[in-house]
């Protein structure tokens, strides 16, 4: 099935140019016209999609050619944009900045080409005038396969400044589709891992998104931008469907050598057919302000595999949802809420009891910290015999990973790509049975596998390996049968 949804990619020469303000503002402005707007974000960012969701009323989705593979970018886009009037895709970093050492892979330019979408370049014009033409000309001519359909000038100081910029760009052949001046109320607060998530400041976030939408409506030519988006034409290929990929996901490939040093594992056994899932089998997913990092496709895949997905808030709920037979704790900011998480002793005990029963538990990054014995000296769930603490050093980057131990997510030897993004340290960094072996920044093993628990710093995107969700739910079925 092909997708003909009009679409725009919002890019910039570098980070800090105003992509999020412009992209979110465009989403809000078009949504206020009554259009169904599909929001997307290039790369592994979890925070910006929260603002996109506020602007559009639809789930913000990520398009990551590294985590999911280039072949899945268009199908995942078509899945998210199905039935919409317009899709707006916010880029990452500078237009041509991709995965380190991988050329254009996972860059905004790469995704724009995969989507056959025109690019709108957001330029911070606060410290330039005529030079803007050279900058735009360079970006427009660097890769002839990337179509830069227009420029939005951001942080323009005055009408005179705007006139100088427009005059310089007249000869570039790239039209100016908008001019935005600095407006204080559209600023959004940041901290150690980027913007503060929507879930932590919903009232202020709603006001900020409204201000972004107002600024874009006043400063941009929405009709010209929509016309540009309609020029994207048809995008051939299949539309991603969770039920289809879960039911048809093939057996995983043969194992590869473990980068942490272990010998290659025996060949895979073909996956057995998915068993009948009992009605009411619940997988609890952590949410709320402390656990805001999650890809929408994970819940969709779990549901397609037969689970009833129920969200709970570890800051407020003192019990797991009744009937929980599996637990997923994604990323977020438990370090910010450590006192509140620690104070909720009934839930900590419930999580420890579930893990102790052998039920499947998948924890990524923040989830790993929550399962540890303590975080910054405060008691946590005690499922993992490790201590976690804040650290000044930022750990950031894509990772090629190999499963070191059989777990509820993967057989030993299976390969996945992931992403690390944290300013915390867990000591020790790996258990007796580690979760992953990774190649960068150094060859090492990390994470913990014990009973039904898989806990690791690595964020993964299950759309790249839908068998993960099926395997997890199968283990939930087995755990339920054993408990019964």
Image: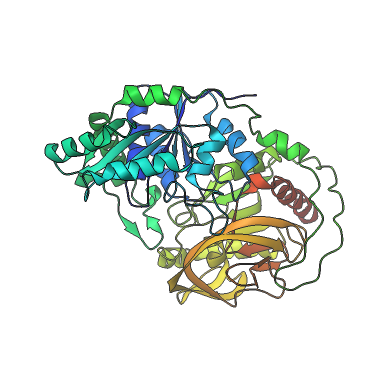
Residue 259 shown left or right of residue 161 in the figure: right
Q: Position of residue 375 (x, y in %)?
A: 48, 72
Q: Position of residue 167 (x, y in %)?
A: 21, 34
Tell me, yes or no, if residue 82 can be seen here.
yes
Front residue (pair 430, 140): 140
Q: How is the image coloured?
A: rainbow
Residue 225 shown left or right of residue 476 in the figure: left
Residue 27 shown left or right of residue 398 in the figure: left
Q: Position of residue 346 (x, y in %)?
A: 53, 63
In the image, is residue 85 above or below residue 25? above
Front residue (pair 168, 425): 168
- Pick the quarter of the image with the N terminus: top right
Front residue (pair 482, 390): 390
Front residue (pair 459, 416): 416
Task: Look at 36% across and 54% down and name the residue there.
Answer: 196
Task: Look at 41% across and 63% down and name the residue there.
Answer: 337
Q: Position of residue 338 (x, y in %)?
A: 43, 67
In the image, is residue 414 above or below residue 156? below
Task: Look at 36% across and 44% down and name the residue there.
Answer: 19
Task: Look at 72% across and 71% down and name the residue there.
Answer: 433
In the image, is residue 344 above or below residue 141? below
In the image, is residue 137 above or below residue 380? above
């Amino acid at each position: 099935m092909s997708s003909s949804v009009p679409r725009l990619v919002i890019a910039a020469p570098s980070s800090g140019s105003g992509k999020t303000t412009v992209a979110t503002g465009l989403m809000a402005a078009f949504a206020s016209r009554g259009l169904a707007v599909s929001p997307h974000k290039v790369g592994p960012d979890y925070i910006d999609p929260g603002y996109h969701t506020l602007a559009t009323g639809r789930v913000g989705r990520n398009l990551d050619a590294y985590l999911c593979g280039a072949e899945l970018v268009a199908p995942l886009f078509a899945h998210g944009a199905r039935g919409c009037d317009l899709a707006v895709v916010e880029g990452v970093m500078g237009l041509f900045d991709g995965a380190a050492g991988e050329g254009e892979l996972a860059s905004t330019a790469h995704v724009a080409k995969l989507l056959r979408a025109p690019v709108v370049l957001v330029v911070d014009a606060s410290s330039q005038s005529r030079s803007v033409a050279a900058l735009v000309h360079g970006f427009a001519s660097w890769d002839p396969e990337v179509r830069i359909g227009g420029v939005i000038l951001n942080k323009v100081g005055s009408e005179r400044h705007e006139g100088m910029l427009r005059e310089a760009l007249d000869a570039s052949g790239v039209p100016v589709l908008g001019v935005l001046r600095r407006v204080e109320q559209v600023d959004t607060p940041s901290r150690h891992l980027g913007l503060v998530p929507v879930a932590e400041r919903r009232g202020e976030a709603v006001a900020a998104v409204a201000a972004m939408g107002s600024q874009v409506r006043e400063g941009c030519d929405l009709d010209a931008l929509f016309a540009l988006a309609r020029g994207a034409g048809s995008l051939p290929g299949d539309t991603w469907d969770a039920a289809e990929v879960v039911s048809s996901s093939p057996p995983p490939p043969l194992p590869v050598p473990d980068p942490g040093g272990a010998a290659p594992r025996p060949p895979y056994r073909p996956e057995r057919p998915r068993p009948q899932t009992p009605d009411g089998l619940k997988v609890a997913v952590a949410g709320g302000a402390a656990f805001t990092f999650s890809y929408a496709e994970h819940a969709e895949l779990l549901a397609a595999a037969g689970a009833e997905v129920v969200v709970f808030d570890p800051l407020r709920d003192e019990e797991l949802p009744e009937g929980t037979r599996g637990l997923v704790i994604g990323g977020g900011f438990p370090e910010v809420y450590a006192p509140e998480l620690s104070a909720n002793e009934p839930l900590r005990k419930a999580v420890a009891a579930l893990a102790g029963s052998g039920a499947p538990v998948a924890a990524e990054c923040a989830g790993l910290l929550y399962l540890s014995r303590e975080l910054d000296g405060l008691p946590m769930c005690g499922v993992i015999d490790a201590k976690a603490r804040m650290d000044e050093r930022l750990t950031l980057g894509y990772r090629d990973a190999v499963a070191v131990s059989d777990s509820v997510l993967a057989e030993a030897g299976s390969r996945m790509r992931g992403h690390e993004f944290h300013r915390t340290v867990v000591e020790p960094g790996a258990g007796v049975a580690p979760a992953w072996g990774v190649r960068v920044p150094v060859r090492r093993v990390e994470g913990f596998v014990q009973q039904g628990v898989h806990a690791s710093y690595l964020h993964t995107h299950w759309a790249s390996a839908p068998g993960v969700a099926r395997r997890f739910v199968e283990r939930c079925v087995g755990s339920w049968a054993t408990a019964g």
